[in-house]
């Protein structure tokens, strides 16, 4: 979801952006703690390159970048419409941003009572491809439009059941992977 209101700041040629995070309930998972060391926006495609792969070249605009003290949260505490700010209000150049990326340094999952991973534990660190390098690409419903002097709030609805894929079957000796 993306919202905007006018007249929030008088910084010419820029607007403010804030990223919020929320979640939906999970079936097997008791907690899903993620640590985010960087949140950044990427601008439009380079001239003449309108493909999705071409969109967002360049280093991006940091909204949060702190590897020493990453933002950590149990995503399952964000159910039922609860949100938490990943970033403060950050001034960015007015314009259109086609990508939001979150660099996840750690993702830990604890299964609900009665469920275990195949090694017998209830806790596992997840492997998240590209998360520590370029970050997880957040799929946007529409580009983020930052107007001059506006405030844009972006809420990332992270559905743990949809994004943390349980492999295996809890009802078999092979268990969950």
Image (cartoon, rainbow, N blue to C red):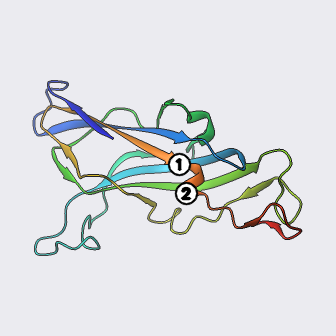
The quarter in which the N terminus is drawn is: top left
Work out how far the residue at label 2 is from the one at label 1, CA to CA, in angstroms. 6 Å
| In the displayed structure image, the side of residue 161 where residue 157 appears, left or right | left
Q: Nearer the viewer, residue 102 or 26?
A: 26
Q: Secondary structure at mark 2?
A: helix
Q: Which residue is mark 2?
A: 163
The quadrant holding residue 69 is: top right
| In the displayed structure image, the side of residue 48 where residue 126 appears, left or right | right
Q: Secondary structure at mark 1?
A: strand
Determine if residue 66 is in view.
Answer: no
Q: Position of residue 72 (x, y in %)?
A: 59, 41
Mark 2: few, some, or many residues within 10 Å (few <14, many ≥20)?
few
Marks 2 and 1 in Cβ contact (< 8 Å) = yes
Q: Position of residue 102 (x, y in %)?
A: 45, 53
The quarter in which the C terminus is drawn is: bottom right
Determine if residue 26 is in view.
Answer: yes
Q: Which mark is residue 159?
A: 1
Q: Position of residue 55 (x, y in %)?
A: 24, 67
Going 70% across and 67% down the picture, which residue do you hit?
167
Q: Nearer the viewer, residue 67 or 97?
A: 97
| In the displayed structure image, the side of residue 155 where residue 17 appears, left or right | left
């Amino acid at each position: 979801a993306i919202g905007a209101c006018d007249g929030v700041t008088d910084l010419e040629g820029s607007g403010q952006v804030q990223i919020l995070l929320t979640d939906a309930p999970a079936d097997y998972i008791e907690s899903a703690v993620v640590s985010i060391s960087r949140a950044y926006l990427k601008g439009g495609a380079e001239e003449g390159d309108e493909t999705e792969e071409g969109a967002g070249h360049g280093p991006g605009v940091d909204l949060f970048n702190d590897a020493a003290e990453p933002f950590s949260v149990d995503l399952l505490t964000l159910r039922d419409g609860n949100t938490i700010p990943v970033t403060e209000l950050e001034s960015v150049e007015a314009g259109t941003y086609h990508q939001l990326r979150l660099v996840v340094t750690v993702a830990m999952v604890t299964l609900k009572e009665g469920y275990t991973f195949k090694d017998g534990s209830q806790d596992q660190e997840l492997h998240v491809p590209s998360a520590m390098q370029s970050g997880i690409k957040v799929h946007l419903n529409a580009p983020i439009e930052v107007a001059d002097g506006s405030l844009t709030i972006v809420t990332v609805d992270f559905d743990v059941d949809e994004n943390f894929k349980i492999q295996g079957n809890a009802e078999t000796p092979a268990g969950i992977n």
